[in-house]
Amino acid sequence: MAIQLKKSYRFALRSSTYITLIASTIVGVFLYLLYEFDLWVIITFALSLFALCFFILQYRVEKFIYRRVKQIYDDVSLLESSSFQNQAVTTDMRTLTHEIEKFAKDKKLEIETLKVRENYRKEFFGNVSHELKTPLFTVQGYIETLLDGAMDDKKVRKKYLQRANKGVERLIYIVKDLDMITKLEVGDLHLEYEEFDIVELVQSVFEMFEMKAAKKNITLTFDMPYDEPIMVYADKERIQQVVTNLVVNSIKYGREEGTTEVSIENLIKNKVIVRITDNGEGIEKHNIARIFERFYRIDKSGSRKEGGSGLGLSIVKHIIEAHKEKIYVESVFGMGSEFSFTLEKAK
């Protein structure tokens, strides 16, 4: 409080001092030249003038400057700036200037953050509508064709109903993935931790997608023979989903007659790191920071020849972070990519 009083009266004190010193000097010289010099008269005059100047200046400051400064505080407080809450109003210009500058910087940063979020929101909703309208229009088209008379032909009816069913399955797939991400973000998805062999899990994923890889002559392989099991402690089902999404992506964006290679290495005493490497298209540098966003498409044309919900990498990131682990990506455009994530070893 003392500091605030000192700052509040600083202008009046300094101004009164300057006026008193100048006036006392002039009076002293006047007395010395024309009358008898008396020190007590000078001291009494100086004290009286100082007190009078101080009260007059402080009154003027309070009446004309303080009110304007308080209005600035009131206007700023309407913007709910935390830096102005529960803070005494001061007429000290240096303090006020510093506070206003800090407020302006905070607001500028907040506005820039809101702009980024707004752009992300617009892009996200645009991507959601793109992902949903494709299967919806497909289903609608087949149903309208059937209603227009095609249902009378049993072969056409069965074929179109099967295709419409695939569109519905794709919609369900997208909704389920969105539901999973939402649960992971708010912490509602319970992880069932258990000990399991990560080598065996990767091998089972390889077997699941060897036919898909064979269509592009892509080899699914380990970097070396793993004769002994490597036991980790995590949610087996969720980690299988992580490996599945990463292997599927490596096949999807892999080159003909390419390779998807998995390695499992000791990282630190209680951690292993699983690396999934391909020699496919690779990712351009400016896309790497955003590939884990929901529905973010590297291919801006929007074509999805291989299907999928567009949420695979986002789910991977959320599952790994739900385990309180880390995921990394390294890529050279035109040469390939490597996704890696850490897991806790079984005790």
Image (tube, rainbow, N blue to C red):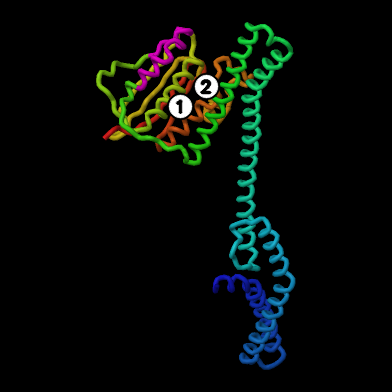
* Cβ–Cβ under 8 Å for marks 2 and 1: yes
In the image, is residue 265 part of the stretch drawn in magenta? no
Residue at image location 59% in from the left, 18% down from the top: 165
**Residue highlighted by disc 1:** 329
Can you see residue 289?
no
Q: For the magenta stretch, what is the residue range? A: 201-220
Name the residue located 65 percent from the left edge and 64 percent from the top edge. Answer: 93
Label 1 Cα crowd, 10 Å radius (few <14 / some 14-19 / many 20+): some
- Magenta highlight: main SS: helix
Frontmost residue, 318 versus 115: 318
Q: From the viewer's side, name the closer residue of 153 and 161.
A: 153
Residue 167: % across, % down: 60, 19
Placement of 270 over or under 285, stated as above or below: below
Q: Is residue 296 left or right of residue 317?
A: right
Frontmost residue, 318 versus 149: 149
Picture disc at residue 61: none
Residue 283 image point, x, y percent: 52, 21
Q: Which residue is mark 2?
A: 283
Dot 1 amino acid type = Val
Q: Residue at x 38, y 35 (%)?
A: 192
| Picture coordinates of residue 212, whole percent (x, y) | 47, 11
